[in-house]
Amino acid sequence: MLSSWTTPDCCQWEGIRCSNVTAHVLGLHLPGEFDVYEEITEEITNRYMRGEIQKSLMELRQLEYLNLSSNDFQDSHIPEFLGSLTNLKYLDLSSCVFGGEIPTLFGSLSHLRYLNLGQNSLEGSIPCQLGNLSQLHELYLARNSFEGNIPSQLGNLSQLQYLDIRFNSFKGNGIKIDDGGQWLSNLISLTHLYLYSVSSLDRSHSWLQAILNLPKLRELDLKDCSLSDHFIMSSKPSHFNSSTSLSVLHLSGNTFTSPMVFHWVSNFTSNLVELNLDGNFLEGSTSSHFGMVMNSLRNLDLSYNYFKARDLKSFTNICTLSSLYLNQNNLSEDLPSILDHLSSGCIKHSLQELDLSSNHITGTLSELSVFSSLKTLFLEQNHLSGKISRDIILPPQLESFSIQMNFFEGGILKSFGNACALRSLDISSNNLNEEFSLIIHHLSGCVRNSLQELSLSNNKINGTLPDLSVFLTLKRLDLTQNQLSGKISEGSKLPSSLEYLFTSLNNFEGGIPKSFGNACALRLLDMSRNSLSEEFPRIIHHLSGCARYSLENLYLNMNQINGTLPDFSTFTSLKGLYLSENKLNGEIPKDIQFPPQLEQLYMKSNSLKGVLSDYHFANMSKLQDLYLSYNSLALSFTQNWVPPFQLLTINLRSCKLGPTFPKWLQTQNKFQTIDISNASISDIVPEWFWAKLPLVNNWLHMNISYNNLQGIIPNFPQKNPFYKMSLGSNQFEGHIPLFLRDSFLLDLSKNKFSDSILFLCGNGTIKILYQLDLSHNQLSGQIPDCWSHFKSLTYLDMSHNKFSGKVPTSMSSLFDLQALLLRNNNLTNEIPFSLRSCTKLVMLDLAENKLTGPFPAWIGSNLKELQILSLGSNNFYGTLQTQICYLKNIQLLDLSINNLSGQIPKCINALFAMAQKVSNDYHQYSYDIGRVSGYNLYFLNEFFMWKGSKQMFMNNGLSLLRSIDLSSNHFSEEIPPEIEDLFELVSLNLSRNNLMGKIPSNLGKLASLEFVDLSRNQLVGSIPTSLTQIDRLSMLDLSHNYLTGEIPISTQLQSFDASSYEDNFDLCGLPLEKFCIKEESSNAEVHEDEYSFFNNDFFISMAFGFVVSFWMIFGSILFKRSWRHVYFNFLNNLADNIHIK
């Protein structure tokens, strides 16, 4: 706007109004741009002016009109001298980020009729001097931080028509004032009063009586005022006059529970046209009295309560009611029953709009034609299901019908095609599975002459795209996320009236037919996330009919479109071109130009090459978002080139911008996101770039990482907070500047910073810094002990530096900390006991330091949310106590290379996360910064010894890992068999200890194991055959033990190197060179198999028989002489025969 102020005559400037008689400046209309859509989030599209309002404005003594709203005067107060502009009739300073108090001199603006100071950060009390503005018609003070009572002097404003004090933080007794609120009754001209969120109103009733006496009051807003049933019960109807003028009453967001509120309302006003009671806790039946006396009520909002269908009877006899909102209640009956309740009274003839969405309504669609005047019906987000009955007839006047987010099946009935007034039909997010051509056929009745919006997204509709030209008025068609497939034929014509076509997330192939280019009204075409594979120049050629004059947004991202960029400058209305994640290739021609109206250009993640010069952008004065990342492009501009555009988003990651820092960025003053990472820049960042950052809009997202940027970052005063600042992987050095503390996420890793004291210990509380990464720098000395400043810190990484000394005790004040990484420093002493206060810790990595002391048992007792605990390569000693088993969420436990001893706790099977399939790909934390709140996701990274080398596990790779590493300690006794219960364990390293006994026999039950190292212990016995069952095992080391026997035979176990089994007592078999001696064992096995009947019983029987037989024979010889003679004669003869031979 100010760029137009070039001519000598200021009265010709935009935003200036002068007197036709005296040529004095009478009006300044210089607001920023405010997008109505962004009002909910309170975002200003463009704030044109910043800084402070200069005193030179006082020279405009005749000024009557001043509008500076939606500009940026942050950290400044409203100038007192504005009160000297006594001719002012209109003053708008809303949404200007002013702080401080309202100047009392404003009471001197006696001609003022309009004053708007809303949506700032004003505080203190409302000055009583505003009561002097006797000509004031409208006063807006909403959305500030005022406190105290509203001054009674405002009662002097007898001409005041609008009073808006919503969303303030009044303290004390609400709006109670000295005369009990009687001053309100003096506002005899008041028509609109907004007290939204003014608290403590329920402590008095006098203010209400005063309001009801106002003769012209038409609208009263009492939303979120903490009014309750007690307020109703304590107010006697006889004490109140009935207001005859009040037509709109807002009671939303209070704490009413009893339906008595309806009776109460009807006692003091029966002429209401609109009543809003949404967002209370109302339930139960209402009296018939309300329905009988409310003879003017047209709009009734009861959404976000707890009503059931049977509670609605009294509303059905309000014969004037045209709009009834019951969304988000407790309606759980079937739809026919609910409609029966509603159609039992005269409301069935008057009702034009009915909202039953977001309840628990069951059943299927029932008869609706009884509601003869119904124009809008919302049944979305319920539990309706089944196929729609063929008998259903829609109301003849129905214009808008939504049944999205239910469970309907099948298709659309022919009767829908006969709804001649229907303009909008939404059946998205159901289970429709009919062929699309049949759906179109059923809708080809008279509805084709009226239907303007048709949404069928997120179903299972199949087939391809038929001819749609029969729909004469259709403007918007949404087919997103279905099962449409195949090539779109040339016979698929679009309606001549169609403006928006959404077909993303389907399986269309080939290209875009020429017929699409003849859709002369088409403004948006979304065919992203399909399988289109045609060359891009051919697609542009097919769209070059009359559509090239109307098309504003073309979404073709995430397809397989190939070819290079054609010249599409003939698309004169194109504002958004989305070509990311395709297969575009080749060099960009030097002579092509982009459409002059283009605002968004997305071409990231392709294979484009070549050089983009200032010629390509010469006519793009409206360009706002530029996405060229992940191509092989170079941006080469003339040295003093001034771009015609002001970018909001600069996304040039991996493009070649260097080696010098791009000077053209000096002209960009509005960017909210800038990513020039990995851009081959090797230079000192110019001071003008750092000076620009504190002045840009709120929540800057900047990524300049992975370059070779050098130098010291200067310090600048910071006005606006940053969102994400990524400066990692560069060569920055020196101190860390203080202004970077006003970041939400700050990554300074992999640089050469050497001083963090000013940054960490500077004055002031750091309220918004949630993630801080200072890893891989040259920071040394003790870690500064001033962490109590960092109230919001959730993620802190200071690993891979040169810090020494103790872990600071003030870190215990980081109550929201979820990840603490101090790996690879020179920290000593014990882990401070005070760290037990950080109970939200998910990751604690203190590995590779010189920490000492007994293993802290309080870690298990207090830090029960831990998923990653890495204390390896330190000097911890003592036993591992059973408190370690309290870590039920632990997924990675690394205590390796310490001096721990004793037994591995048998309760190790209590580490439940190692026995369950739970994948935490990301973590999140909540944030609350002023009026902005929500959740932010972050990922964890961790170094871990894997298959013999230290590797970095990131994101989902880390989330899938379940690992225990107790190696290089002095653990003794046996490996607890309870370890066999950790079914999801992926890595187990118990090497280099003094473990004895056998390897647990059922270790092979752990089917997820990929890495097992039990080497250099004193394990005995054989290798369990269960290990042959582990299919994933890719690394096994059992060497340097006392194992015996044959190595079990399996594909895996024989595939390992012999070193995995070396230096054992008596192991044999492949892959070792020592073969097992199999003969004896083989014969024994055969003998055992063939003569298995020679069991213990057999040998006992044989011995018993031998003893009995021996004593029978020998006893006979001993006791019978004749037997003795015969026996000895036999022996003599036997001896003689032997002797002769």
Image (spheres, rainbow, N blue to C red):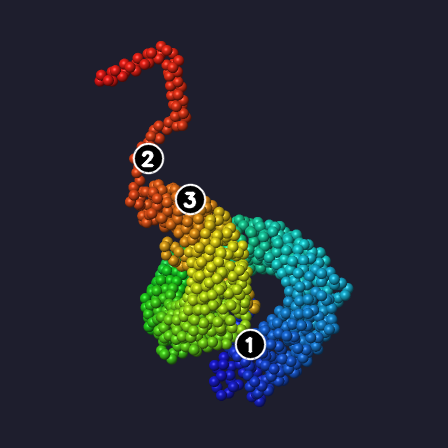
Q: Residues within 10 Å of mark 1 (few under 14, many from 20)?
A: some
Would you identify the image quadrant in which residue 256 lies?
bottom right
Front of the two marks 2 and 3: 3
Tell me if residue 566 comes above or below residue 961 in the rendering. Answer: below
**Callout 1 secondary element:** loop
Would you say the residues marked 1 and 2 are in contact, meaning their CB atoms lie under 8 Å apart?
no
The kind of residue tagged 3 is Gly
Q: Residues within 10 Å of mark 3 (few under 14, many from 20)?
A: some
**Residue in the image at 58% along x and 78% along y:** 77
- Sequence-wise first label, 1 or 2: 1
Q: Which residue is mark 2?
A: 1081
**How far from the left and from the top, in percent, is residue 792?**
53, 65
Say the numbered circle drawn on residue 997.
3
**How far from the left and from the top, in percent, is residue 672?**
47, 71
Tell me if residue 616 comes above or below residue 356 in the rendering. Answer: below
Q: 845 or 598: nearer the eye?
A: 845
Q: Is residue 426 left or right of residue 140?
A: left
Q: 676 or 193: nearer the eye?
A: 676
The kind of residue tagged 1 is Asp
Residue sticking out furthest to the bottom: 22
Q: Residues within 10 Å of mark 2 (few under 14, many from 20)?
A: few
Spatial CA distance of label 2 from label 3 is 25 Å
**How far from the left and from the top, in percent, is residue 1128?**
32, 14
**Callout 2 secondary element:** helix
The answer to whether residue 41 is visible is no
Front of the two marks 3 and 1: 3
- Sequence-wise first label, 2 or 3: 3
- Sequence-wise first label, 3 or 1: 1
Q: Which residue is mark 1?
A: 75
Q: 441 or 1035: nearer the eye?
A: 1035
**Residue in the image at 55% along x and 56% along y:** 380
